[in-house]
Image (spheres, grey):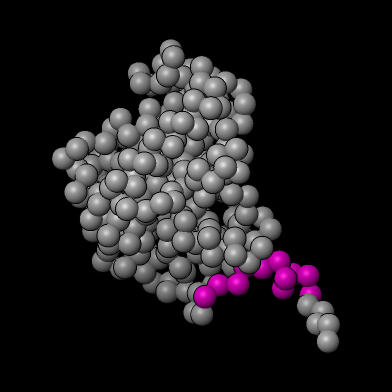
Amino acid sequence: MLCYLPLWTMAQIQWPAGKEAAIMLTYDDGLQSQLENVVPALNEHNFKGTFFLMGYYLDAKDIPQWREVSHQGHELGNHSIYHPCNEAQADTLSSHCRALNCYTVEEMLNEIKIMNTFLSAIDGKSQHSYAYPCGQYKAGGQDYGTPMIAQGICNFARMSDSEEVITSPSQLIPNNVPSFTAFPGYKAEQLTSFIEKVLANGGAGVILFHGIGGDWISVDVEEHQKMIDFLASHPEIWVGTFSDVLSYIQQQK
Ligand SMILES: [Zn+2]
């Protein structure tokens, strides 16, 4: 017997029992302030976060701690080795020949593969997600995200600076996952209003942080904690890793 469902029902994401939406908390650049201020705050509520590490900034002495973070159920993601961005936005490490516009697609994919191997040595996992440095997806003017996903080098790739909420499985584009970017001086209300929008839509939303109470592009510890408290007061929101939540949605396509 054919069963006709309303179109909107078919398009919605079906969440696990007791959940109505999902928030993915992502933290870039592998910063000390994340190990000190974020991991304990997440663990207190059994929330799982995603930490996008970049190879050149990773200190060997911190590797046991990142491995422990992974063992606690958090995700270690790939943020490249040299963090190449286009020259106009380049920092000292991505200037001149390390600028993204100087790379070929093949060179960029090779760098990501090496970083995957590096991450596997830390977390023992064979699959990693990716965050585009500076949210830029073109190496030498060519899209490298599409072949990266098509070749299975990474499973999902996160963009930046978007308040878009993923509300249906068909809306999930693995090489172009939007994220709401938290900038310095942001108050908890700016973060929770995005979370409320995600919840109201029964969707999935990604938040991008850098430092928390230190390092760079930093959000105050207190404001971050208020957001954590807000999430803790909403058990209907699944706070899961980037790969876990997106894989769950992807299976509904
Ligand atoms: Zn970065």
Nearer-the-camera pick, 216 or 92: 92
Q: In the picture, which quadrant includes the N terminus?
A: bottom right
In x, y percent, where is residue 104?
A: 54, 22
Q: Is residue 95 above or below residue 231?
A: above
Would you identify the image quadrant in which residue 169 lies?
A: bottom right
Q: Which span is picked out in magenta?
A: 6-16
In x, y percent, where is residue 250?
A: 59, 60
Q: Residue at x 59, y 49 (%)?
A: 174
- Report how many numbered discs are placed on residues in the image: 0
Q: In the picture, which quadrant includes the C terminus?
A: bottom right
**Furthest residue toward left:** 61
Q: Is residue 14 above or below residue 246?
A: below
Nearer-the-camera pick, 189 or 50: 50
**Furthest residue toward top:** 96
Q: Residue at x 35, y 36 (%)?
A: 54
In x, y percent, where is residue 221?
A: 27, 50
Nearer-the-camera pick, 1 or 134: 1
Nearer-the-camera pick, 160 or 120: 120
Q: Is residue 170 above or below residue 235?
A: above
Would you identify the image quadrant in which residue 78 lies?
A: top left
Q: Residue at x 31, y 52 (%)?
A: 123
Would you say residue 102 is visible in this rendering? yes
In x, y percent, where is residue 172?
A: 62, 54
Residue 11 magenta: yes
Q: Is residue 24 above or below residue 4?
A: above
Q: Residue at x 80, y 82 (%)?
A: 3
